[in-house]
Amino acid sequence: MPEGDTVYLTAQRLQAALAGNTLVRSDFRVPRYANADLRGQVVDSVGSYGKHLFIRTPTVSVHTHLKLEGSWHVFHCGQRWTKPRVTARIVLSTEQVEAVGFSLGTVEVVHRRDEHRIVEQLGPDLLGPNWDAVEAVRRLRRLPDQPIGVALLDQRNLAGIGNIYRSEVCFLRRVHPATPVAAVPDLLALVDEAHRVLTEAVGKPRRRPLAYGRTHRPCQRCGTPLATGLLGATAPEYDRVVRRERGIFFCPRCQPAPATRPEDARYARYAR
């Protein structure tokens, strides 16, 4: 699933292509908005919040979420698309370019005044201008027994981290992803690490992961083969995003697994 840095960079690319230009065509290939017509409207701006992307005109905001397979591409008018046309969900065209959203998980058109309703339940945006580490820590601490690896994926705590970066941040801080939030030695430092990692990711080409996807390969700190497992939450208070189990990657030596209790079985199945 694309993470916050991917969405941020996508917004920058669309901003450069669309902002200040008049739309001459809009084609929404989702039933709810099939009749929406933005022709004649000028694109004010394109921005992101966590994993959410917004293309704004003076009256409406086109909100999209990439989910698992979505992507936005910009083509010169008349240029052949590089993805199957059947997967296009939105086409927004100016006189010069076509911006096409393929396989988007969420598509909606909302009034500009209502855009805040989409993000108001989310935690601080790791790549936003008003990033607030203290507020992110406060939100994480609301469920002290929740594994930190689950809490980091909950966008209500902090917005922008996905499965790749939760493993990377925990590895860098030497914290096992199944460690309860309350047991993380320095929660603020971990949150600051997440901010640093994502900020670096948008400023230069993505570095090779240190932990994610490197099962059985040697830890770059101690040489121990990296392990993998599944971590998720099934308690009813968690939303669908964090309820599903997902893979974690960690060093058994640098990130020792926390002591488990019978009630923690709902969270994790991992190698020690």
Image (cartoon, rainbow, N blue to C red):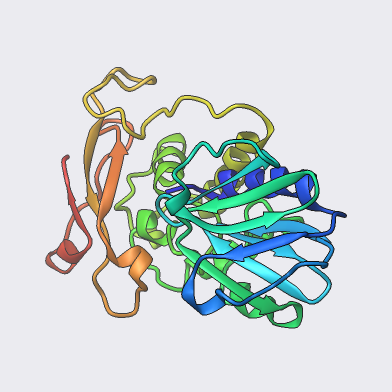
Residue 184 placement (x, y as % from top left):
42, 53
Which residue, as the protein is rendered here, is positioned at the far right? Answer: 20
**In the image, 262: left or right of 24?**
left
| Quadrant of the snapshot with the C terminus | top left
* Residue at x-position 66% and y-position 67%: 62
The front one of 48 and 178 is: 48
The image position of residue 218, as x and y in percent, is: 28, 19
Which quadrant of the view contains residue 267? bottom left
Determine whether, in the image, residue 52 is placed left or right of residue 217. Answer: right
| Whether residue 77 is situated above or below residue 54 in the rendered picture | above
Q: Position of residue 222 (x, y in %)?
A: 33, 19
Query: How many callouts does the rendering have?
Result: 0
Residue in the image at 37% along x and 65% along y: 241
Question: Is 65 displayed left or right of 38 in the figure?
Answer: left
Q: Residue furthest front?
A: 78
Q: Please tell me whether residue 251 is drawn above or below residue 23 in the rendered image.
A: above
Pick the front one: 9 or 191: 9
Taking 248 as reference, is 59 above or below it?
Answer: below
Residue at (55, 39) in percent of width and height = 81
Residue at 35% over, 64% down = 242
Query: Where in the figure is residue 72, as x and y percent of width and height?
Result: 58, 48
Q: Is residue 21 left or right of residue 50?
A: right
